[in-house]
Amino acid sequence: MLSRTASDLYWMSRYLERAENLARMLDVSYSLSLMPQDGRGDGLHELAMPLLITGTLEDYHARHGELHAERLLHFFALDAANPASIYSCLGAARASAHAVRGRITADMWENINATWLDIRDIAQQGLSHYGMSRFCEWVKERSHLFRGATYGTIMRNDAFRFIRLGTFIERADNTLRLLDARYEMAGDQAALSDGTAHAYYQWSALLRALSSFEAYTEIYRDAPGARQVAELLLLRADVPRSLRACSEEIDQILASLPGLNGRPAQRLAAEMDARLRFTAIDEILEEGLHAWLTDFIPLVRQLGDAIYSSYLEAA
């Protein structure tokens, strides 16, 4: 497969996954901002969390000045001038899909094209007319539909593999960043305590954002706390959005790609998967959850760079 084609397929899926992840992030921040803040302010600190996670705080201040709830939501949802907005991500995904129209199925193209047309209409109406929670659910639904169309219609060839590869790289990075942000937001004492209401709502919101609340209640009996949530989202291979599940998928996909150019990326993926496979939650907490996450986030970025240089960089 030509590197340009592989790149468009890879980034198409990354941008779609990123849009879904942004919707999940916004939904949980918006929901928590509406709850009593327990002396922590008026909820703007919750809405500002996506700015910190995505590194766009300075860009927002440069354009909009002080934090403002309505402007914050628009900035991340429908701002065409913000490359990190859901609107921009869906536009970039549609452009990549158009470039590889002949390598994806009609169902996949119709889904992503309809999604782009719909969000343009939503942008004209505005979030106040559509509703924030409804908008986030719509983004997740469209992502699910595209993933279903992909699974149900495309051949299991290299195109399929690069689409899946983009999905899991993006998902792994998002899970790490969301967990780190929630841990910091809960605060050191609250994060380690199972009994505080603030910690309960923080961890429950994170689990719901990653569609893992039901999995948590099936596995654990205690109220959500740092230890259990970290173990679930980092080390459980049977939880679809966990770091371990993403790592296993990436390792298997890279191992199935032909040629010798991908050896650096394959080696990094295998090392990352082995590290997670043989790490216990006690080791992570002993090092410090924030320190461990801060150390692992660059590894995912390094793996993404290795995939780019091995498969996607034009000769």
Image (cartoon, helix red, strand yellow):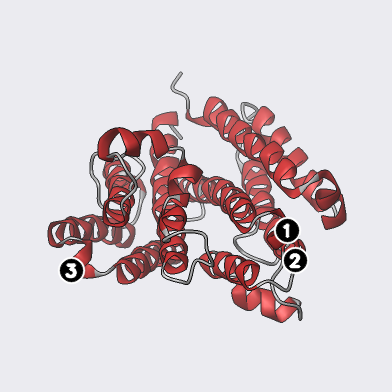
**Quick check: marks 3 and 2 in contact, CB under 8 Å?**
no
Q: Which residue is mark 2?
A: 193
Q: Which residue is mark 1?
A: 189
Q: In the image, what residue type sits under mark 1?
A: Gln
- Residue under the image location 45 percent in, 30 percent down: 3
- Residue under the image location 74 percent in, 77 percent down: 219
Task: State how many labels appear.
Answer: 3
Q: In the image, what residue type sits under mark 2?
A: Ser
Give how far across and how far down residue 310 sits, in percent.
57, 27
Q: Is any part of residue 108 visible from this angle?
A: yes
Q: Separation of disc 3 and disc 2 at Cα? A: 40 Å
Q: In the image, what residue type sits under mark 3?
A: His
Q: Is residue 281 left or right of residue 249?
A: right
- Residue under the image location 62 percent in, 78 percent down: 214
Q: Is any part of residue 153 visible from this angle?
A: no
Q: Which residue is mark 3?
A: 129
